[in-house]
Image (cartoon, rainbow, N blue to C red):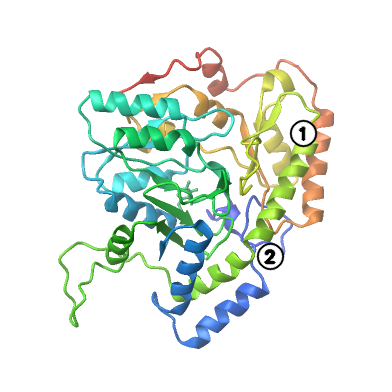
Amino acid sequence: MAVDGQDDTQRPAGSGHERVLLSPPDVGPLEESYLLRALRSGWVAPVGPEIDAFEREVAERVGTAHAVALASGTAALHLALMAVDVRPGDAVIVPTLTFVATANAVVYTGAEPVFVDCEPESGNLDPELLDRALRELRRAGRRVAAVLPVDMFGSCADYGRIQPICAAAGVPVVEDAAEALGATLDGRPAGSFGRAGILSFNGNKIITTSGGGMLVSDDGALVDRCRYLSTQARQPVPHYEHTDTGYNYRLSNLLAAVGRAQLRRLDSMMARRRAHRSRYAELFAPTAGVRLLGAGDPAANCWLTSIVVDPEATGWQAAELAAHLAAADIETRPVWKPMHLQPVFAGARTLLTGTAERLFATGLTLPSGSGMSRQQLDRVCARIDDFLRRSPRGTDHDLPEVRRAHDTESVGAAVFTS
Ligand SMILES: Cc1ncc(COP(=O)(O)O)c(C=O)c1O
């Protein structure tokens, strides 16, 4: 975090300071021209032709029949959960390794997020544990109203296994593809796997509208319902008439114009992030004990690249590399802190193996932005390289508490807490 409390990842790139950021917005002349055109058209509102076109273009890219542009990915999650009939008191299964918005959206509906652990290679929801959680919740007499897999850092969750499990249990999937626009799984685009999917266009995402999101689905009635709820649930009569509690969740026409320009550049921005990831893969390849999170996924959008460090093998820890890079004004960040460790979710029901905790303790996210210049990436790699050269291999470093706690924990012996 910066001193003023702003999130560094959201600062403009190339704004005069030398700091290399994790994933700043990558906008330029194309976005400027689209924005100006929208402004000059007079459609300065949460309705207008840019929104209609942006919805059509995103739906086409994701391969769904419909889309509704919204103020944020969080708003899209909230509406999607309501639209699949999540009600107060229901349980909703959420991977514990995610950004807080996934779990918060469940809380907004009055339902209870149940946190399930992830797979070590990808950090995505563990299908076997999901199956077990569904069975155990059923046995406990709970109504499980939705499963909310997250496409972690732009890599699709294992829908080949998740979908049949959810179908057999009769539970709808809502896909949190906030980080995954452009990724695919077996040729099918991220966002298209659930009853509904959601995308985020927050400032740090693969494409941005500065702030914004979208709900995508093949289900026309579901999308109509979300559109209605997103516009204060206004009835189609001349005066203001309301029979439901609605929300002010629509995206502005100006921001939709920015999104359209970004969407045109999505493939080239994805290619740049992929090239950064390849460079990091080469750099760390000779170092035993370092792997890239989700390295086995050739169709990820490479939104963020994270390494996972085994300190027993490397003789150093992720946090030490982070400190070395911070001293060189290079931003890094730990992998998500699991939801079940967040004070706001203390006491939540969980099904855990310790994998998410280990990824939090040993993972480090590296600068990944598509706007990162060759010189900046060279600088990051040079600083990593001098850290690796100076690091004694296999020395007995003091491990922080969280690591020690998990060294003794057996993996796979998940315990369902209630
Ligand atoms: C996994 C995940 N879900 C949901 C969100 C929420 O999106 P937004 O910031 O657009 O509300 C984000 C990112 O911000 C995210 O990373």
Q: How crowded is mark 2: few (under 14 residues within 10 Å), some or many (20 or more)?
A: few
Q: What residue type is labelled 1?
A: Phe
Q: Residues within 10 Å of mark 1 (few under 14, many from 20)?
A: some
Q: What residue type is labelled 2?
A: Ser
Instruction: Name the residue: 53% across, 18% down.
Output: 406
Name the residue nearer the viewer: 299 or 246.
299
The image shows residue 156 at horizontal and vertical percentages of 53, 42
For the residues labelled 1 and 2, the Cα–Cα distance comes to: 30 Å
Instruction: Give the label on residue 158, or none.
Output: none
Q: In which quarter of the image is residue 323?
A: top right
Q: Name the residue under label 2.
A: 15
User: Is disc 1 placed on a helix, strand or loop?
Assistant: helix
Instruction: Name the residue: 81% across, 29% down.
Output: 286
The image shows residue 266 at horizontal and vertical percentages of 62, 61
The image shows residue 95 at horizontal and vertical percentages of 43, 35
Name the residue nearer the viewer: 190 or 246.
190
Disc with the residue nearer the chain's start (1 vs 2): 2
Name the residue nearer the viewer: 380 or 246.
246
Q: Name the residue under label 1.
A: 284
Up/down of 226 relative to 168, above or below:
below
The image shows residue 189 at horizontal and vertical percentages of 53, 51
User: Is disc 2 placed on a helix, strand or loop?
Assistant: loop
Up/down of 295 relative to 393, above or below:
below
| 230 displayed left or right of 253 | left
Foreground label between 1 and 2: 1
Res. 97 in view:
no
